[in-house]
């Protein structure tokens, strides 16, 4: 059978750091409030004018170099972002131009925080169907431009950060237990679409963007934080248990759980519910980057590998929950 295997990874974090202390100057908040509620100490933001594909580019180039693969050998780009450079076309096409690979197909997905898990499922399916053998899965998020840096927007301004990561995924001959992407579980529930959303521009109105909409402050991120929290702490354990059952493994066999870095309190609640030791098994780097939406899992995986926390043969569980709501989990054998 064909296995979908990570052959190289890359990440990119914009240079500019925004600390909690800096936010204190812009809004009524405090380092203590943010640290206690979220675990975040700082996040990064893009330079003015640096769009989503520009943030993806260095991560993609690093992943290709680590995979020792020429960009021309990539057969498909899957680009995950909540906010692309334009409403249309997708940022995959823009990255195609920046990489200089005209003709290479590029598809955008908009599964927000679950984008990396949904993207992995697509890469695995393309590889197992035999359609493609070398895929670049890119996640890139520029969220700082959509945050209100004022007391009105403090619930989201403190949470989100910019960043990108990329993985080259290749086909290898193998069997169920060989290295590569294992079982995947995916879910969406659109009943909660508005609980975490950016609603403007909208095709529900003509014109789809107006001065009035902006005056009414409808173009900022909307979040029902309590409902997101409530669903996250139940959906994360449920989907992790589901994917382990699909794979036929128990939590004792899992070396590392890499949750989407939403909020340290969410990860801690999940670890507690699942009786998993937070510091040795559940990975966290949210203090440095905040919530980088679909880029958070591959950034965390990249750093976990660099820190020597993942070794050949280890079983990893990656799990995400976010806007949609959509959530999912994947097993990866290193
Ligand atoms: N600084 C100070 N006060 C703040 C801030 C801030 N940055 N943000 C919100 N507040 C205020 C609110 O305005 C509110 O004030 P009010 O009571 O006067 O109206 C008050 O704090 C709310 O306090 P709590 O209800 O105690 O806050 P809570 O414990 O619910 O924490 C939080 C809020 C952190 C947003 C929480 O609901 C949460 O973590 N939700 C999950 C959100 C999340 O992780 N989203 C990420 C995207 S989705 C994903 O990735 C899973």
Image (spheres, rainbow, N blue to C red):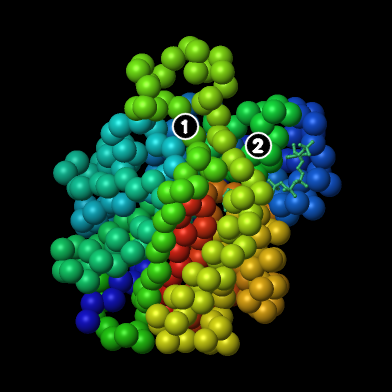
- Residue 225, compared with residue 229, is above or below; it is above
In this view, the residue in front, 173 or 62, is: 173
In this view, the residue in front, 54 or 69, is: 54
Question: Which dot marks residue 157?
Answer: 2
Q: Residue at x 82, y 40 (%)?
A: 30
Question: Which dot marks residue 213?
Answer: none
Give the farthest residue toward the top.
Answer: 211
- Give me the C-alpha separation between circle 1 and circle 2: 17 Å
Residue 92 percent coordinates (x, y): 31, 43
Q: Are marks 1 and 2 in contact (CB under 8 Å)?
A: no
Mark 1 vs mark 2: which is more N-terminal? 2
Left or right relative to 306: residue 225: right
Within 8 Å: ligand 1 and the Cβ of disc 2?
yes
Residue 282 percent coordinates (x, y): 63, 71
Give the farthest residue toward the front.
Answer: 191
Residue 297 percent coordinates (x, y): 51, 60
Q: Residue at x 20, y 47 (%)?
A: 104
Left or right relative to 183: residue 217: right
Q: Nearer the viewer, mark 1 or mark 2?
A: 1
Ligand 1 picture quarter:
top right
Within 8 Å: ligand 1 and the Cβ of disc 1?
no
Q: Is residue 213 visible?
A: yes
Describe the element under mark 2 as helix, strand or loop: helix
The quadrant holding residue 144 is top right
Left or right relative to 326: residue 39: right
Q: Residue at x 38, y 59 (%)?
A: 118
Residue 280 percent coordinates (x, y): 67, 76
Give the quadrant of the N terminus: bottom left
Dot 2 alpha-carbon crowd within 10 angstroms: few under 14, some 14 to 19, many 20 or more? many
- Residue with the mark numbered 1: 199
């Amino acid at each position: 059978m064909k296995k979908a295997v990570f052959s190289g990874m890359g990440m990119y974090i914009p240079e500019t750091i925004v600390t909690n202390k800096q936010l204190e100057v812009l809004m009524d908040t405090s380092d203590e409030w943010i640290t206690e509620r979220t675990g975040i100490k700082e996040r990064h933001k893009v330079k003015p004018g640096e769009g989503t594909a520009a943030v993806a580019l260095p991560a993609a180039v690093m992943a290709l170099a680590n995979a020792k693969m020429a960009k021309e050998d990539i057969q498909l780009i899957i680009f995950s972002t909540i906010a692309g450079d334009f409403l249309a076309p997708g940022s995959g096409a823009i990255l195609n131009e920046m990489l200089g690979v005209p003709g290479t197909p590029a598809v955008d997905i908009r599964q927000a925080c679950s984008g990396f898990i949904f993207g992995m499922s697509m890469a695995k399916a393309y590889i197992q169907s035999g359609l493609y053998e070398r895929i670049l899965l890119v996640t890139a998020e520029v969220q700082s431009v959509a945050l209100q840096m004022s007391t009105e927007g403090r619930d989201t301004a403190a949470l989100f950060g910019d960043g990108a990561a990329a993985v080259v995924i290749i086909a290898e001959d193998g069997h169920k237990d060989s290295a590569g992407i294992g079982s995947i579980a995916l879910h969406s529930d659109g009943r909660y679409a508005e609980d975490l959303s950016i609603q403007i521009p909208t095709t529900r109105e003509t014109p789809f963007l107006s001065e009035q909409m902006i005056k009414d402050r409808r173009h900022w991120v909307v979040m029902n934080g309590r409902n997101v929290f409530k669903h996250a702490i139940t959906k994360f354990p449920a989907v992790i248990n589901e994917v382990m059952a699909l794979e036929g493994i128990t939590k004792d066999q899992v070396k590392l759980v890499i949750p989407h870095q939403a909020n340290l309190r969410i990860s801690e609640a999940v670890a507690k519910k699942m009786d998993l030791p937070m510091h040795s098994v559940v990975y966290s780097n949210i203090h440095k980057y905040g919530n980088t939406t679909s880029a958070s899992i591959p950034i965390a995986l990249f750093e976990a590998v660099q820190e020597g926390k993942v070794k050949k043969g280890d079983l990893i569980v990656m799990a995400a929950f976010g806007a949609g709501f959509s959530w999912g989990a994947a097993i990866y054998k290193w």
